[in-house]
Amino acid sequence: MNAPQEQVIKMYAKREEIYPREIDGRYARLRWLFVWLTQLAFYCTPWLQWNGRQALLFDLTTRKFYIFGLVLWPQDFIYLAALLIISAYLLFLATAIAGRVWCGFACPQTVYTEIFLWIERKIEGQRSARIALDRQPPSLRKYAKKSAKHLAWGAVALWTGFTFVGYFTPITELMGEVVTLNFGPWEWFWVLFYGFATYGNAGWMREQVCKYMCPYARFQSSMFDRDTLIITYDSQRGEPRGPLSKNTHGNGGSCIDCSLCVQVCPTGIDIRHGLQYECIGCAACVDACNNVMDKTGQARGLIRYSTERAMEDHMTPTEIRRRAMRPRVKIYTAVLGLIVLATCSALFLRTPLKLDVIRDRGSMGREVEDGMIENVYRLQIMNTSEKAHLYKIAVGGLPTLAQATADHVMVEATETKAYPVRLRVAHGTGQTGSNKIQVTLTAVDDPSLHVKESAVFIVPR
Ligand code: SF4
Ligand code: SF4
């Protein structure tokens, strides 16, 4: 009997350079549409103005998030959490229906790799020219091309880092600091860090990020089922593969073994071997194969979007679409709809005024002139609107309760004000110890803008 063969499985395979061939087709155009939309949104949004300030700004110094007409404070963290939950749910829903559609079309790693590849092609040429250039011995021409490419990549990466920081520091101020090279240490750090990450991930690492670093790639397969759309090679139709001369004589399958589907693949895999975890669902191989089918006069769709069930049961596109709305997808959609509805309602009903009533613990209730009992408080007033308001302070909950301080306070737009107030009751009012009272704040120019908070009034023995 033969001894069992020892097999070595490598945890990390040495990287082989991939030179994806440029491809034109429906999905390539769709991907470029996403590149334009996402990058226009990313690079332009920080420059938009709203009410004389940056429309979208996550101001960490003052801990206020400006989102067009909305100003969120640390107390509004729930809305940001809801936004993250909605984004995650959208991703889950898209994955359950169309597999790695996010990875293939909209993920920043895919989008920046596409931009960096475009620069590479413009400078070094198409696939064969790039392979030839890399195999050439060092020369002035080779260094010139490589330097030009890295300079262009570096410029895009630094501008990306600068734009990223512009979401946290007003970008017009940042621009002024660029001109005078007067960046603060944190701004330098984040511009360089984000720029370096973009340069490294899209220029050098590319498919390695998807294969080894991306956590989402690891667990998204748990959201797949037999009705999830995946990129599939129709082996029943394609095999036995062989040269065109053999196939057109009716002895072979539709695949003419041109290897174009492998040459265009950004992760360098052969989809004809079946679904592999490296496949990011970019559909470049679908475009490549459809072009080949057109040229050879065969029906498109040898490589196509389909589902595991559809391949086994020979389902039609209509049947595939019908299966897409399965219970799991309906549940995801319903939960997502509920979260969106709840978040929008909460935002719509949100009062742009917050009040905390903090009793001065240093001074318990004390007797003052005329035998009155006095308690001291600090009102923490947050005007979260973008307009200054004069507020009227009203108190209630105990007979004879009155204010010994001014009962109007002005708070500027998006400001927090700490306002001390002294409240008094006549001797003999309330019970000894704690008495519940209410403090109400009402905007003078808009009585619908009001907030009420409870507090405790201490009557000493
Ligand atoms: S592109 Fe189509 S025909 Fe060419 S090798 Fe791939 S599957 Fe076969
Ligand atoms: S196999 Fe096709 S869909 Fe998958 S990554 Fe490669 S080219 Fe994209």
Image (cartoon, rainbow, N blue to C red):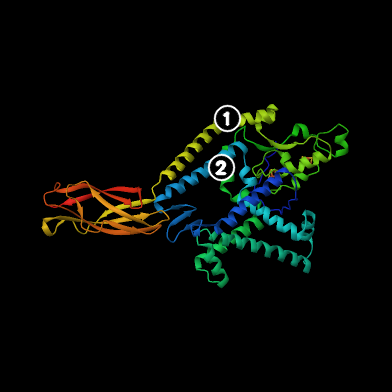
Q: 51 above or below 272?
A: below
Going by the numbered disc 1, the residue's amino acid type is Arg
Q: Nearer the viewer, residue 414 or 257?
A: 414
State yes or no: Cβ of the residue under disc 2 lies below 8 Å from any atom of ligand 2.
Answer: no
| Mark 2: secondary structure | helix
Query: 123 left or right of 12?
Result: right
Q: Which mark is residue 413?
A: none
| Residue found at the very far front of the displayed protein | 445
Res 14 visible: no
Which quadrant of the render holds ligand 1?
top right
Q: Position of residue 216 (x, y in %)?
A: 57, 45
Q: Position of residue 120 (x, y in %)?
A: 72, 58
Which residue is the site of mark 2? Answer: 91
| Mark 1: secondary structure | loop
Which tag, 1 or 2, sits closer to the chain's start?
2
Q: Which mark is residue 326?
A: 1
In which image quadrant can residue 175 be found? Answer: bottom right
Query: 69 left or right of 268?
Result: left
Q: CA distance from mark 1 to mark 2?
A: 17 Å
Q: 225 above or below 129?
A: above
Q: Nearer the viewer, residue 454 or 293?
A: 454
Q: Position of residue 408 (x, y in %)?
A: 29, 57
Q: 162 above or below 110?
A: below
Q: Nearer the viewer, residue 238 or 5?
A: 238
Q: Position of residue 270 (x, y in %)?
A: 73, 43
Q: Residues within 10 Å of mark 1 (few under 14, many from 20)?
A: few
Query: 290 left or right of 228?
Result: right
In which image quadrant can residue 228 be found? Answer: top right
Q: Residue at x 32, y 48 (%)?
A: 451
Going by the numbered disc 2, the residue's amino acid type is Leu
| Residue found at the very far bottom of the displayed protein | 180
Res 276 visible: yes
